[in-house]
Amino acid sequence: MQTRGGKILLYGYGNPGRGDDGLGPALIAELERLGTESATLESNYQLSVEDAAEVAAHPTVIFIDADTAGAGPFRFERVIPERTISFSSHSIAPGAVVALAQQLFGKHADAYLLAIRGYEFDEFNESLSYLARENLGEALEFVTRALQERRFDEYLKQYGIDCGCSISADAQ
Amino acid sequence: MSHVNKVVIEPVTRVEGHGKVTILLDEQKKVTQARLHIVEFRGFERFVQGRPFWEMPVVVQRLCGICPVSHHLAAAKAMDIVVGADKLTPTAEKMRRLMHYGQIYQSHVLHFFHLVSPDLLFGFDSDVATRNIIGVAVKFPELAVQGVMMRKFGQEVIKATAGKKIHGTGAIPGGINKNLSISERDELLKEIDQQITWSRGAVKIARDYTVEHLTELTAFGSFDSNHLSLIRADGAMDLYHGNLRAIDANGNKIFDQVDYQKYIDFIAEEVRDWSYMKFPFIKSLGPERGWYRVGPLARVNTADFIDTPEAEAARKEFAAVTKGKPNNITMAYHWARMIEVLHAIEKIRDLLNDPDLQGNDLVVTGERREQGVGLIEAPRGTLFHHYRVDKNDQVVMANLIVSTTNNNEPMNRAVERVAKDHLSGVEITEGLLNHIEVAIRAYDPCISCATHALGQMPLEVKLIDHRGNLLDQRST
């Protein structure tokens, strides 16, 4: 797949009050602190249907979420539009947001997921675990580089499984 | 001792988080009881102990990523009491109200258009592969776009008033920390007429569906109940502030205009060994008869009138269906919810045109108190926040009764009614599952914390016999 130009939407989601669940917003906060002009930065507790409008306004989107499994520090995968799954809660999977953007606004964004490995999710806790913080640092370095290089096909081979399958089957 | 068979359904899809339903059968395979198990996130009280009280309006938003604004405002109202701010400035109260109506609007719209409309448009028993938001987008694209744009508008109202989407800081003890700028106001006003038009349409969809299917809906998961909500001094619906009113299934007042600082004298919570979540009840009636509904249905039932003209006209039509008596039809929640959408957008329009929102008098203080209670009518129902604060300004006690907890018994009753009507044999059919989900969804429960990281479980259905053996299992 050819990499498109234009602003990239970086969308981190998760609850910062649930320990490592806040990895997505934490990465966005780091990027906001550093400053970037080549990306639109968004964060929220969870994805929702109205995010389809924001996705539709960008040629490329990277969703950033915490991951409960995997070796770490992160994986990078393609998001395939989900047209058949049931909408399972107020929280909506990245693939469903992309599908909605296509269906409602006729826009086909290249969509990816950056899943950062977290470890502690079960307690009220406003801070990241030590290991999650380490992973966040590596993810930040990766995103900073990716915003300049935009070699997403390479990253898929290097950090993920570009199998064409749905990642959101794993998502709640 | 009779054997009891258990049919376990977990988790419930298309409601917040996940839950599990257990249906208890007797030896004749008849339903004796249905239990909705909700995993309530614990540890909040410990989490806030020792924290300074002024942090609470922000900290409590960690509780839930679904309705953080409601917790934000309920905690701020409790802390108003703690700092002795008995009457906020007009700018502060109106900014908070605007934030709250934005929250009501976006939450109700999301629930109706994207969780409920697939059931109403395609039917409860239609294919789950298409009975979802993507299916609506394919077959009813205009409606799906409306839902997205209405939700987006509500979120923009929140952003303009709370300051940001995550961990908003707009409300602080004794007031607010920002007013609404002219440019923020004008941006929102640009869309208001379109939003009102769409809201009228949403009421019509819900109204038409309910009236056309009234016979079957009257029987579906329904039962008589008490109803509880905040109410304004003149009996008007007030989603932000007021006193407590409770009515019985016939509309008789159980109590009225109760100062919610004294809620503990009127409301108690029962613990049951099979549930993590408590069962609130009206003390004077006891746990058997004192449970109640909260949320849109309860609020439309308890209100004498609504103070915005179009929503009031819709309320009158709603009340006419039950000849002025309280409506106890579970599925009527959807119609009531859309009446509140219309009310919220009328209120947003009126507030946006109120110059008080550009005022600069934002905070008041008074005599410091040791405790405070904050109540608000959150989208899902009455939300209680109660805190005690020591001399060092640290929180030493927190007690929350969230909306979904208030609706715990009604949701269990709804599931039981559906199970009794639709369970055949000991097989969990797709139809039964759908009907149970539809009944629970009417309450729009928020049944879990907002963690949603990748790797959570999918829908799983288990069938277990009276000896504990797994008979059947289904998962999505």
Image (cartoon, rainbow, N blue to C red):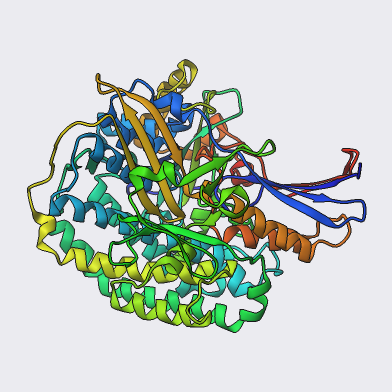
Query: Residue B33 location, x and y as percent?
Result: 76, 52
Q: Residue drawn 14% across and 54% down?
A: B90
Query: Residue B117 location, x and y as percent?
Result: 55, 69
Q: Is residue B414 above or below residue B1?
A: below
Query: Residue B209 location, x and y as percent?
Result: 56, 79
> Among all residues in the image, which is located at the extreme front?
B284
Query: Foreground: B345 or B215?
Result: B215
Asked if residue A3 shows in the view, the reply is: no
Residue B238 relative to residue A161: left or right = left
Residue B3 relative to residue A154: left or right = right
* Number of numbered discs overlaid on the protein picture: 0
Query: Foreground: B441 or B320?
Result: B320
Looking at the rendering, in which quadrant would you find the N terminus of chain B? top right
Residue B439 relative to residue B254: left or right = right
Query: Residue B414 location, x and y as percent?
Result: 65, 60
Q: Is residue B346 above or below residue B243?
A: below
Report which quarter residue B73 is drawn in.
top left
Q: Residue drawn 26% across and 56% down?
A: B97
Report which quarter residue A157 is drawn in.
top right
Q: Is residue B186 above or below residue B283?
A: below
